[in-house]
Every structure is written in C-alpha cells, then in structure tokens.
Image (spheres, coloured by chain):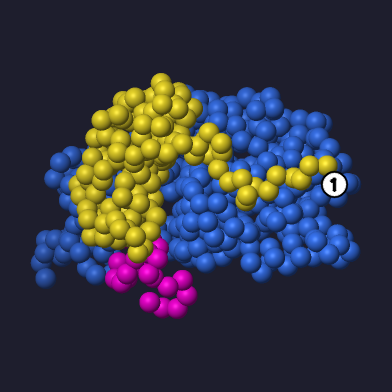
Chain colours: A yellow, B blue
Amino acid sequence: MPEPMDPIAAPATPEACFGKEAVALALAGHAAIAGLKDWIVDAKWDRGELTLTVAAATVVQAMQAAQAAGYNFFEDVTAVDWYPAEPRFQLSYSLLSHTLKQRIRIVARVAEGEAVPSITGVWPAANFYEREVFDLFGVPFTGHPRLTRIMMPDNWEGHPLRKDYPVEGYR
Amino acid sequence: MPPTEQLDQIDAVGSIDAINSEDLRIPGVEDIVRDVLEHRKPEGSDPVSDQTMVLNMGPQHPSTHGVLRLVIELDGETIVALAPDIGYLHTGIEKTCEAKFYQQVVPMTDRIDYLCPMTNNTAYALAVEKLLQLEIPERAQWLRVLFNELTRIQSHLVWLGTHAMDIGALTVFLYCFREREELLRIFEAVSGQRMMTSYVRVGGLSLEPPAELYAEIRRFLKDFPSKIDEYEGLLNGNPIWQGRLKGVGILSAEDAIALGVTGPPLRASGVDFDVRRDMPYSSYEKFQFNVPVSNGCDVWARYIVRMQEFRESVKICLQALDGLPEGRIAADAPKIVLPDREQMKTQMESLIHHFKIVTEGFAVPAGEATSSVEAPHGMMNYYVVSDGTAKPYRVHMRNPGFATLQALETMCKGRQIADVVAVIGSIDIVLGEIDR
C-alpha cells in the first residue's frame, strides 16, 4: 500500500510559479495581468491564488486599472508586519470580480512611517479598512477622509498588531 | 435672563458646539457635521429651523445588537449625518491568533461571529487547508455543508426574532427562539457545545455525528417549512410591519458594491452574487439551490431575501442528508489531524502523533492563502499568512458586518430616526465580528 502523501513534505502546488515573467507566461490572457501590466513589479501564482506586487506610490493607479479590468468589488485591505525585514509592512488588498468570479491580491511593501495613497477615492469601502490598518499597524494613508483610530481608544499608545508589540502584558 | 437669551442657550446645546465638549468628542464626526451644515440640508427638513441636534445612540442600546455607538446629527426627526463608533468589543483576536498553534486558533474563530461558529470554523479550516494543500474527504465536506446551512438557519432565526422585536412584534422573537433551541440541541449533540462549537477542524471535523442525530435533523427540517409559513403569517400582512419596512433604508446596487456590502443586503439590492454558487467551496457545486435576489433595495427586500434563504437552506440540508457519502470525517494526515481516541490508547504511533500535535503543533509551509465562504451575514474571508512554523504569522478576518456598517449612513440619511432601528435590524449586525 502506498504511503499517504505527507502534505508537509510536498508543500506548494506543482504549477506554482514566481516572478513577473513566469506568471505572465503561465497565466496568459488573465484579466488582471493584462490590465495591470504597467504597474506590476512582481507576481506570484501559488495555491491557485494570484498575488501581484505593485509599488506603494502607485497603489491608486493599480486599483483603477484593476477596476477597469473587471475587478469591481473591493473586499479588504490588511497588513502583515515582516519586522525586522525592510521594508517592514506588506499591505494586502483583496479584490473580487463579480462577473469573472475571480479573486486577486495586490500587495505593496512600505517602510515604517511611509505614507500610502488612500484608495477611498476608487472604493469608498476602503474607508474603515484603511483606518483599521492605521490603528493596528500605524501605516498612514494620505488622502483618507477621516484617518483616526477605529478599534483602539484615541489616546492609545502603540499599534497592537505590530510584531514588536507584546501579545500579553501592558505595553 | 430675558427669554430670547434662554432660547439661544438651549439652541446652542443642540448645535455643532455641543460635540466639541470632551465627553462627546469623536474625531472626524465634527467634520461630517460641519460639512453637512455648510453644504446641504436634506429634503423635507423643517425650513424654519436651521439648528441641528447631535444624538448619541448606544453604546448600550437594545436595538444595536451588541455594543455599537451611533453619533447621529438630527434636524428635527430627520437624520442629517450618522457616524458609527465601533471598537467596544475589540479583544485583539487577530493578535492572539499569532501566539497560538494552528489548531488552537479554531476556538478563537467561534467567538468572532458568535451566531455562526461553524461558518467561522469552516472559513479558517479552508484557509489553512489551502496552505497545507490538504485534501478533505467527501463525507467531511458534505457534513460541513450540512452544518453550515443549519448554522445559517440558526443565525437567520436570531435575525428575524430580534428584527421583529425591534419593530415591536415580540411574539415572533419567542417563536424563533423556540426553533433555535432545537438547532442548538443538535449542535450540542454533535459537538458537545451549544454555541461555541469548534466542530470543524483543520483537516476535517472533530467527531463523527451520533447515528441517531440524522433522524432528529430530518424531523427538524420536516417541521421547519411550516414554521416559516407561521412567521410569514404573523408578519407579511401586518400593516405596521409593512409600513416600517417598505421603502426604508434604500441602498442602490452601485452604492452596495462601492461600500463593500455582501450577502443578503447585496442580493436585496439586485446584485446576483453568492459565494456558494459562484465560487463554490466544500462541495457546494454538487448541490442544487436557488440564490434569492430582489430588486427592492429596501429593508423589506432584505427581509424577503432572508426568508427565502431559510427555504433554500432547508433544501440544501435535505440534499446533504440524502446524498451523504461514506468515508472518513477527517483527512488521512496523522501529523495534522488528532488521532481517534481509541487508537491513541492502543497504538504507539497514534500516541506519538497525538503528543506531537498537542505539544508542538504542526508546521505549515510558508505562503499566504485566502478562503472565502458565504456566511449568514455575507461574505466571510480568512487571510492566513504562514512563515513555515507551527504558529500562524498573521490571521486576518474579513467579516461582512464591518463593511456593511459603512453603508448605514447611506441607508439612513434623510430618513427618520426610528428607521435607524429598522435598518440596523435589516443588515443583521453582530458586533463581535466587527470589532474582533
């Protein structure tokens, strides 16, 4: 009897590919790659999910291009703190297309204190999500209508979801 | 003091100056209020008075279904501006997840949206299974569907009961909780817990349901459609119910998409999208069901859509019971799924695996994955990032209520204050999922 496949020994899907050219070749004709070709700096096709990296300064243009390519629904934006790596934060935008029935992830890396253009002009739905990222990670967004804390009290010090913030104990 | 001066003072309390005092201050709200005052007044507002009043609704208010604070600017009874203030239930679940093993995160997910624990469990399990590239046995997938749909019925029962109670129909609340009690007994029989089930685990399910439970679920599903008729008989023809719901809380399809609204409120605005049908997970593609859509865009349409979802959920549950495949309830992955209790006590290998999983967890290959499920309240996504260790590097939940709450102002602006209660009921808000 053959050994059952150990999912840890064989991790990613065989068709996974990394890098802008490799992904563009593997997913020729994909709406997002064609629509965002001017803004993509890196790409990843892993576990059936497409992740496109763009420069933080061009997030708004990339979102407009994605919207034009058919990704009409903004799902959320969140951050990942890769401390102590630099640039520290990874912003992950998740977009959905109601017609193509596809989801893409657009990521941008930002250093601590670096401001990111707000995409509330493209999708008003980003309002609360950007406030959440600002509150819990301390990533500022320029052009946001009301960038204030949303979860924590206004006089709170620090940003709880940063990796150098303790899980237990008070600061 | 001359009477005119007294009047001036009273007016001042209800004006923009009032919210500048420290105890009422919410950053940002002043800006909205000022903006509205300078630019426009809603149609139908009193042309004589130019003073508005700022009213705090909540945080402790029975119709806010939790701890939600709304700062409402009123012109008479008409809403000029509305700003939700959330965070009262923030417990840092996302931060806590980063300090737990993958399998220890499951009980945390129950507590996010406490009306649909099974849906939360499923969404989290799907994300981690995608990271692991783990195949789940068919039987486990079908049981997940069965219990997800029972959870939907349970969650919608709480919605209907509380929504009707807010409008003033207390009887419906008691009827709904009578049926909900039967469902909670089923959940208790299958998982040992009435509400915080933690039944769906990474790799499958925690326990095989007891054999006699299927007959009980069938009995519930057989009776339930007549109960739906009973609720509709109580509500549909009721002139108060119609008057409070019809034409209230209008949300156009464009606004719904722009504001990130999902689930029944989105479908009640005429957008035909359901994750179960359009991006199926956990074998939903093998089930036949309709997705109720309405073009009404108002609170009544959301009521109609959810009432039809009751019937569709019953259909899906019956299909799941009829076609339930034989097999295991968890993947054949001994390093990830806890062994059977009996095996653990008799077999050396199982004991070692059990010990390893409990003490060290299991490593998940590095990467990131998003799972998406159709929760009772809308689209629920789990975003899990792994750095290759046994603890998740980041877990983020995209919960439907957080986005739907942004649409509250659009739905309430220009309406009367009593409509806020109807609109909050219609978006089926759960503050636990919003604040996390």
Q: Which residue corresponds to mark 1?
A: B213
User: Which residue sits furthest top?
Assistant: A29
Nearest the viewer among A102 and A29 is A29
Nearest the viewer among B56 and A164 is A164
Q: Is residue A132 above or below residue A69?
A: below
Q: Is residue B130 above or below residue B392?
A: above
User: Which residue sits furthest front?
Assistant: A2
Q: Residue at x 31, y 30 (%)?
A: A36
- In this image, A101 relative to B200: left or right? left
Which amino acid, by three-letter code, is at mark 1? Leu
Q: Residue at x 70, y 44 (%)?
A: A5
Residue range (magenta): A149-171
* Magenta stretch, overall SS: loop
- Residue A2 in the magenta stretch? The answer is no
Nearest the viewer among B374 and B131 is B131
Residue B90 at x, y = what percent?
A: 45, 63
